[in-house]
Image (cartoon, helix red, strand yellow):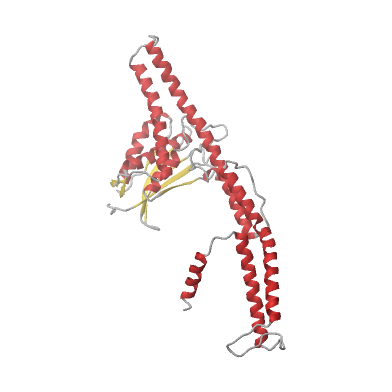
Amino acid sequence: MTLRFPARVDRLVRRLPPLPLTIRLALSHVAVLVVALMAMSVAADTFDVFDRRGLVGRPGHVDFDPLVGSALTVGATAALVLSLVFSRFLLRPLRRVRAATHRLADGHYGDVLDVPREPGLAALVEDVNRLAAALADTERRRARLVSEIAHEMRTPITILSGQIEGIADGIFAPDDAMFASLTDDLARLRRLADDLSSLSLVEESAFTLHPAPTDVTALAQATAERLRPQFDDSQVALHVTPGPQVTALLDPGRITQVLVNLLGNALVACDPGGWVSVTVHTDPDPTPHVEIRVEDTGIGITDHDLARIFARFERIEHPGRPAPAGGSGIGLTIARGIARAHGGDINVASLGLGRGATFTVRLPLRQTQSA
């Protein structure tokens, strides 16, 4: 019976009509008072504290004195009135929080609630304020994204429009150089569209992967060699550390996309004379996984930027060194989304400005490693 009693009470409570929180608090106060008065009366009868005006009766049969009944009635009524009054004061901070959430839903992110003294309510209000700040930051980055995407699209579209009109008017000759320029501008628009499409997949966790047993070491080396001419043109050394064959079940196209992004960012971060290294190794702790590490001697990352570098639409700018032109600020967001779709992740570490950075791609080993 003791095991069934809570379940029966729970079913009984569920059958009750929904009541406002104020009424529920008031009824709980009254119930506590009634139980306390009855317990005091029973205790008084047990220890024979009341003379003959308390509780009288035989063992197993309890009769309430009229004075006790009157006391219970008056006490319950007073408790109900007072509990209703005090419940309004207790619920006032919750009503403010509710009003704040309605303002957040309407897009008013700048309203900050005063933190009450009660620890429980204070934690709730701080969470709401933190949510408002996060939504305001997201809205700021979204507005900046729309502006930057419009700018990114406007430039190639304007060039394409001018070139096509020039060809139609006979101003420009439709030669190979002109068609090459048109192709470059179209490719720029295509890359932007592909980035936005990939971001949408990341946000919806809807990446379609085509996993296959892949030699991760060979994949990293091939990707680095494909980008080596760009490093040579920028006078940045690219070191690929030879390693044993590491076979994992992954989508080689998507992981190549991740490495291209990381190597491209490392190249942009380095000045002439710097270097970028790529290494691959396995680690059994905590579960068997492979790590692809991209390390550079570039401008580094501050602690503040480390916390937000993977946020969408964020482009880290340094004094005297603007963010790279043409960047959408979503490359690292997409790269981390690809890694997490594989069951892995990407982490970053840096000792500070001017001291380089290290990006580590961790991917689970779901395929038997061969030497």
Q: Is residue 281 above or below residue 227?
A: below
Q: Position of residue 10 (x, y in %)?
A: 50, 68
Q: Is residue 18 above or below residue 164?
A: below
Q: Is residue 32 above or below residue 55?
A: above
Q: Work out whether residue 289 can be spotted.
A: yes
Q: Position of residue 357 (x, y in %)?
A: 48, 43
Q: Work out whether residue 292 can be spotted.
A: no
Q: Residue at x 40, y 9 (%)?
A: 171
Horizontally, residue 296 falls left or right of residue 229, namely right
Q: Residue at x 38, y 47 (%)?
A: 341
Quarter occupied by residue 259: top left
Horizontally, residue 18 falls left or right of residue 237, namely right
Outermost residue to the front: 66
Q: Residue at x 38, y 51 (%)?
A: 343
Q: Residue at x 57, y 88 (%)?
A: 60
Outermost residue to the bottom: 58
Q: Position of residue 121 (x, y in %)?
A: 63, 57
Quarter occupied by residue 208: top left
Number of numbered discs on residues: 0
Q: Is residue 40 above or below residue 317?
A: below
Q: Nearer the viewer, residue 359 or 13?
A: 13
Q: Position of residue 236 (x, y in %)?
A: 43, 34
Horizontally, residue 293 falls left or right of residue 366, namely right
Outermost residue to the top: 170
